[in-house]
Amino acid sequence: MIETKTKNKILVSIVILLMGVGAILSYMNEVSKVELTYLKTVKTLTGGSFEPRSSDLDPLIGTPMEDAIPYIRRSSKYYNLPESLYVGIANAESSLKRFKCYNPWGIDTGRGNDPRCYQSWEHAVNGFSQLLKYYYINEGRITPEQLKMKYVGWDNPHWVGNVKAYYDPEIIIKY
């Protein structure tokens, strides 16, 4: 037979455990309500290809990036990425005009602040698309705030706003 003191300790432990589980479930429920509220306000794309708005690449017309438009259109469809994200990140990194080596997205070599040099717009857009798809979007980094934490690597207070000037963060792509 188990002593009364031992039974009481076990009962108290069970009650404390249940209270902790209840608190965790309550917290998770509140988080789910917030997420659900947010998800009700966003456009969702499931499967298929991302359908760009006709004006997504218009900001590139008349800029040094204009020749990149056909490559962005093709890569956007192939990798299922929003065209406006290409423009938004280029805006944050180079204002769509201050860049070298076909690299308006500020991609570095990994050895400091040296920009990665590409040989053509086709090469640059394909490299950027792969980077975005496999190292950001596939990790669930979709909003400018989520992208910034990994892409920028330092606190740039204007980066998110500069991306949002062209990229609609209300779109969630589901894979």
Image: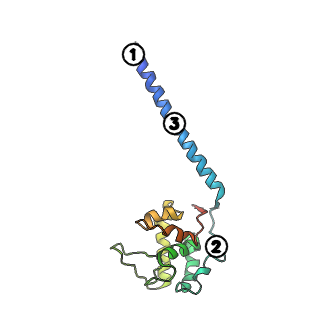
Q: Earlier in the sequence, mark 2 or mark 3?
A: 3
Q: Earlier in the sequence, mark 2 or mark 1?
A: 1
Q: Secondary structure at mark 1?
A: helix
Amino acid marked by disc 2: Pro
Q: How busy is the neighbourhood of tag 1: few (under 14 within 10 Å), some, or many (20 plus)?
A: few
Amino acid marked by disc 1: Lys
Amino acid marked by disc 3: Ala
| Residue at 66% across, 73% down | 53
Q: Which mark is residue 23?
A: 3
| Residue at 43% across, 82% down | 118
Q: Which mark is residue 5?
A: 1
Specify the farthest residue to the left: 111
Q: Secondary structure at mark 3?
A: helix
Q: Quadrant of the C terminus?
A: bottom right
Gap in Å between the C-alphas at discs 2 and 1? 69 Å
Gap in Å between the C-alphas at discs 2 and 3? 44 Å
